[in-house]
Image (cartoon, rainbow, N blue to C red):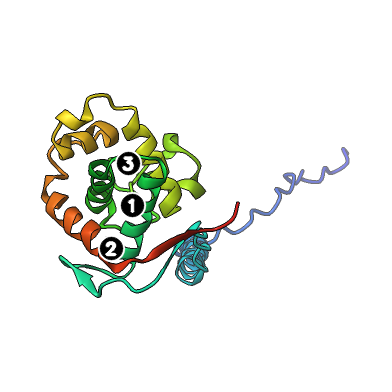
Amino acid sequence: MPAARSAARPAARPARRASRPVAERVARGSDARGVVMGAIGLLLVVLLAWIVTRPEPDPVTQSATVEGDLPRSVAGWSGEQLENAAVVMRAGRDLGLSERDVRIGVMTAMGESSLRVIDHGDDAGPDSRGLFQQRTGWGPYEVRMDAYGSAVLFYRALARLDGRDALAPTRVAHAVQINRDPDHYARWWDDAGAVVDAVDRAGVEVVLAPR
């Protein structure tokens, strides 16, 4: 009698790992994205705080100072504007230029920066700086941001312009500055004359720092 055979058992299959519910998987993915977005938000807050609280850059030390009392106001110009006008006048005269050229320099600084040493440019010249809004090609930043130094740069360029005495003052300024509008400076010609006369009458002294 043949021996009884035991029924063969099928090989045991490895247990399948229970899959997580879809809702749980989505929730965990959302949590991860939330962490990332939170980190980005925190980074933006820190960056904004740094921009707001960072110290202003040290201003460029001016090579010229004005000693004496200037008028309180001349044709709407006052304070540091009149001081800067006095410095521009001194620069032009130091270079031996005519009084017309000196007045053109004051007029140009009025039209470019309202007689203020400003540390920014505009859309047309984002790298423009100083009284005359001179771009990088004019010279070093420290010179362009110095009232006397920037005036010297302007007057040296003006001195190379032959036949300028036959041109209208605004066209002389335009030939040096290459402004979009050649008549841009005309509106400040009378103010420049009034300021030059008033500064001269005040008898202030522009003192240059020793080099």
x and y percent of residue 131 in the render? 34, 52
Task: Judge by depth and name the residue closer to the eye, 165 or 138.
Answer: 165
Q: What whole-number distance in Å separates the C-alpha atoms at marks 1 and 2?
A: 9 Å
Query: Which residue corresponds to the image point at 26% horizontal and 51% vertical from the top-left?
Result: 106
Q: Which residue is mark 3?
A: 125
Q: What whole-number distance in Å separates the C-alpha atoms at marks 3 and 2?
A: 31 Å
Residue contact at pointers 3 and 2, CB within 8 angstroms: no
User: Mark 3, mark 1: which one is toward the viewer?
Assistant: 1
Secondary structure of the residue carrying tag 3 is: loop
Q: What whole-number distance in Å separates the C-alpha atoms at marks 3 and 1?
A: 25 Å
Q: Which residue is mark 2?
A: 199
Specify which label sits upstream in the sequence, 1 or 2: 1
Residue contact at pointers 1 and 2, CB within 8 angstroms: yes
Give above or below for 36 relative to 132.
below
Crowd around label 2: few <14 · some 14–19 · many ≥20 (10 Å)? many
User: Mark 3, mark 2: which one is toward the viewer?
Assistant: 2
Crowd around label 1: few <14 · some 14–19 · many ≥20 (10 Å)? many
Figure quadrant of residue 2 = top right
Left or right: where does residue 99 sit relative to residue 95?
left
Task: Judge by depth and name the residue closer to the eye, 119 or 131.
Answer: 131
Q: Which residue is mark 1?
A: 89
Three-letter code, disc 1: Met
x and y percent of residue 45 in the render? 47, 69
x and y percent of residue 174 in the render? 22, 35
Specify which label sits upstream in the sequence, 3 or 1: 1
